[in-house]
Amino acid sequence: MSSAYGKILKSTSTTSTSLSSILPITTTLQTINTTVTILPLDIHSSNDFTTLISHMHNVFNEIIKEGNTYPQEFPFSLDEFINYFLSYDAFIALKDDVKELDKIMVNENIVWDDKLLGMFYIKPNYPGRCSHICNAGFVVPKRHRGKRVGKLMVQSFLKVAPLLGYKSSIFNLVFENNVASIKLWREFKFKEIGRIPNAGRLKKVGGNEGEEEFVDAIMFYYDFEKIND
């Protein structure tokens, strides 16, 4: 699945620090007193991630069906999901202290609905000379919302994205009814740089089945080079 600019090449890292120096990121989720690990998901490795990717695919389609955070209107096929969410750099938040993903993949009895707390991708927002500006998408499964998993993923994103070669980030469509996301971006001091009127034809929150409304979207920007200011 290409963008309005066609297929965009990844930004090239110009830092001397590698991702392996900070990943995996392990921390404690205070809301439920549980250890959480942020790990990269490389679907091109030799590991068989079939069951995990299938679960992630289902989670994302549930988000689409909710119809009020992502702009997609119809569920993705598995290939469409992989192309959209996993074709650049993808990361997952797993319950417990997980040092290496391949070591838990051999557990056929793993319950991903319990194990996978969240997921996010990082990819260039623009091509070529502007590919140093990234975009990211965050998903927390419905059963794990309200636990501050999103906050942990954003903290990890702010550490990881600069190491991938990005100088800044822009979120194009943060719908104004997405209160949780807006609260997060403001908490981390993302700049509100614009508003797109009637950007999304979304399912009306609290409305009847099939009832929709047009909702504005806010554009949020973050400069990684001023991260310590």
Image (cartoon, grey):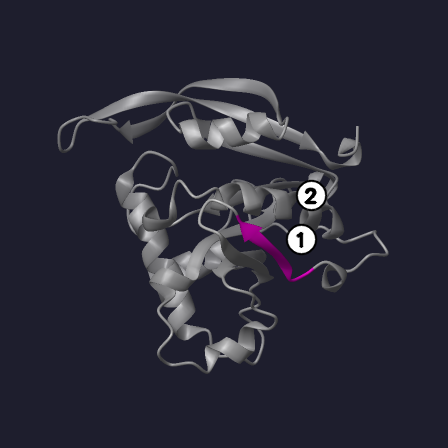
Q: Secondary structure at mark 2?
A: loop
Question: x, y percentage for residue 85?
Answer: 48, 54
State whether residue 23 is above or below residue 159.
below
Who is closer to the viewer here, 106 or 138? 106
For disc 1, the marked residue is 10
Mark 2 Cα-neighbour bin, 10 Å: few <14, some 14–19, many ≥20: many
- Work out whether mark 2 precedes mark 1 in sequence or the reverse, and give the earlier one: 1
Asked if residue 65 lies left or right of residue 123, the reply is left
Q: What range of the chain is rendered magenta?
A: 23-29
Pointers 2 and 1 in contact (CB under 8 A)? yes
Question: x, y percentage for residue 226?
Answer: 78, 31
Residue at x-position 32% and y-position 49%: 143
Who is closer to the viewer here, 86 or 20? 20
Asked if residue 69 lies left or right of residue 205, the reply is right
Residue at x-position 79% and y-position 33%: 228
For disc 2, the marked residue is 131
Q: Hey, what amino acid is under mark 2? A: Ser
The total of numbered circles placed on residues is: 2
Tell me the distance, in whole angstroms, between the alpha carbons under discs 2 and 1: 7 Å
